[in-house]
């Protein structure tokens, strides 16, 4: 028998406080932001606050591995150019399917086209852990 969903939406499990990074920051600055905020990725924004790319630890690590110099390269040069979004009131099931279909670890959550949060694979891990705790 298929278990009914709790009808949760992206809003219920997303991270509403978004650490965004200006796309022109140096890669070494991005590394510092990741460490300081204990995050593994962030949306890159332009001067108007529009999300332009997504950057992750994987991007930074790949750049380091190939011998790139983090003191000269800009975040946008190594970031993933395709920003995958999901609406804030979409179901968590739809969000999970989007992560899988797009083969990404985070989605930019939008409400009327404006960024209101980030949903990562870790948010789903937290959801499962909470369900196992009975909370």
Image: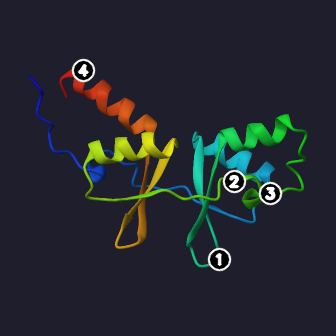
Report which quarter residue 126 is drawn in: top left
Above or below residue 129? Residue 66 is below
- Which residue was labeled with disc 3? 26
Q: Earlier in the sequence, mark 1 or mark 2?
A: 1
Q: Are marks 3 and 2 in contact (CB under 8 Å)?
A: no
Outermost residue toward the bottom in this view: 48
- Which residue was labeled with disc 2? 79
Residue at screen point 55% across, 55% down: 19
Tell me how far mark 1 sits from mark 2, CA to CA. Answer: 17 Å
Q: Earlier in the sequence, mark 3 or mark 4?
A: 3
- Secondary element at image label 4: helix
Left or right of 56 in this view: 71: right
Q: Position of residue 67 (x, y in %)?
A: 91, 39
- Which residue was labeled with disc 1? 47
Report which quarter residue 132 is drawn in: top left
Tell me how far mark 3 sits from mark 4, CA to CA. Answer: 41 Å
Above or below residue 108? Residue 34 is above
Q: Is residue 120 visible?
A: no
- Secondary element at image label 1: loop
Tell me how far mark 4 sits from mark 2, CA to CA. Answer: 35 Å
Left or right of 88 in this view: 62: right
Q: Position of residue 65 (x, y in %)?
A: 84, 34
- Which residue was labeled with disc 4? 132
């Amino acid at each position: 028998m298929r278990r009914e969903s709790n009808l949760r939406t992206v809003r219920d499990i997303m991270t509403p406080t978004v650490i965004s990074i200006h796309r022109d920051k140096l890669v070494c600055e991005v590394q510092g932001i990741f460490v300081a905020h204990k995050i593994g990725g962030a949306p890159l924004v332009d001067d108007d606050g529009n999300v332009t790319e997504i950057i992750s630890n994987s991007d930074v690590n790949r750049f380091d591995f190939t011998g790139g110099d983090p003191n000269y390269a800009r975040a946008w040069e190594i970031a993933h150019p395709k920003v995958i979004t999901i609406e804030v009131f979409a179901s968590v099931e739809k969000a999970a399917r989007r992560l899988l279909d797009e083969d990404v670890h985070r989605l930019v959550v939008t409400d009327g086209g404006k960024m209101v949060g980030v949903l990562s694979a870790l948010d789903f891990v937290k959801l499962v852990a909470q369900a196992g705790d009975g909370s």
